[in-house]
Amino acid sequence: MSTSASTRGRRLPAGRKADLAAYVADNGQVTVSDLAQHFGVSIDTVRRDLDQLHREGALVRTHGGAVSTVEGGLRDKGLDVRLRVQVDEKEKIARLAAEMVDDGAVIMLNAGTTTLAVARALRNHHDLTIATNNLRIPAEIAPSAFRDLYVFGGAVRTITQATTGPVTFTLTSGGPEVDIRCDLALVAVGAVDASGYSTTNLGDAGMMAEMIERAERTAILADSTKLGRRLFGQVATLDRADYLITDTAPTGDLAAALSGAGVTVVSG
């Protein structure tokens, strides 16, 4: 071990964790082994530090490492990074969401890795009609699960591999718009607080809001790292959804606000 590594390894844990958080922020994405080598500590120590920093909101824990939540970090990463974030939590949410979907139902799914997990969890369903702006869903969902699959047109956001734009269909090019409705909208959002549901992009917020407007019932999908936060683009107030599906039920003021808005919390 080098002299510099030995010095880093002997530093107080609080100082090391501050340095670790700064290192992740500077690099955007790191692995546990890289951090262990850089700071001259064991892999188990790095894992404990990452777990604590994740709970404190300083970074986002991934399988095998972490990504930054600051500007230039997770917000600007594509699906390749997001697919490795909160994997177990998303799978749990997806299973709970799939249980709400009846065979033969008409559903809408928005963009995001959580809804990709939902698409995979629908593999044992049949005769679904699915409308989505998520360009990855046609490749992820089992062909036996759906009768009809529609993808909304609009501008493509390559970072999310989804379209943004109005939730409308036309029968022919330039023809009249077709009004669409669904039994259930499954909408993954970036944040949930007492003011409502929000996301980082205004175009995405508009797409989500229209899906909610056209649904008989709406289930918001958000893992526990997104609870108690607020982002730039407001999607809807709390009362516009029927359910919040999450991995860990919220507590305190947010739990009270959801209850007051008539939102049923579904968690694993």
Image (cartoon, rainbow, N blue to C red):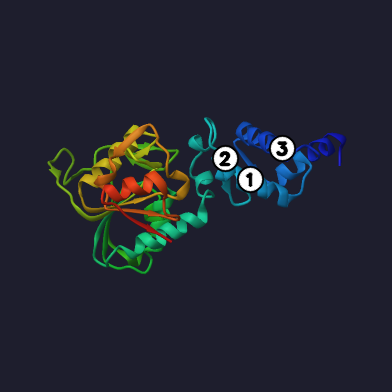
In the image, residue 108 above or below residue 11: below
Q: Residue under circle 2?
A: 59
Structural crowding at the residue carrying mark 2, measured as other residues with C-alpha within 10 Å and reported as few (<14), some (14–19) or many (≥20): many
SS label for mark 2: strand
Say whether marks 3 and 1 touch (CB < 8 Å): no
Residue located 50% across and 49% down the image? 83
Please report whichever mark, 3 or 1, sits nearer to the chain's N-terminal start. Answer: 3
Of badges 2 and 3, nearer the viewer stands 3
What numbered label is drawn on residue 78? Answer: none
What numbered label is drawn on residue 16? Answer: 3
Residue located 52% across and 45% down the image? 80
SS label for mark 3: helix
Please report whichever mark, 2 or 3, sits nearer to the chain's N-terminal start. Answer: 3
The amino acid type, in three-letter code, at marker 2 is Leu
The amino acid type, in three-letter code, at marker 3 is Arg
| Residue 134 at x, y percent in the picture | 36, 47
Residue located 52% across and 38% down the image? 74
| Residue 159 at x, y percent in the picture | 45, 38
Residue 42 as seen in the image, left or right of residue 226: right
Please report whichever mark, 1 or 2, sits nearer to the chain's N-terminal start. Answer: 1
Looking at this view, is 226 or 156 the one in front? 226
Furthest residue toward left: 176
Q: Residue under circle 1?
A: 50
Distance of label 3 from label 1 (alpha carbons): 11 Å
Residue 2 as seen in the image, left or right of residue 233: right
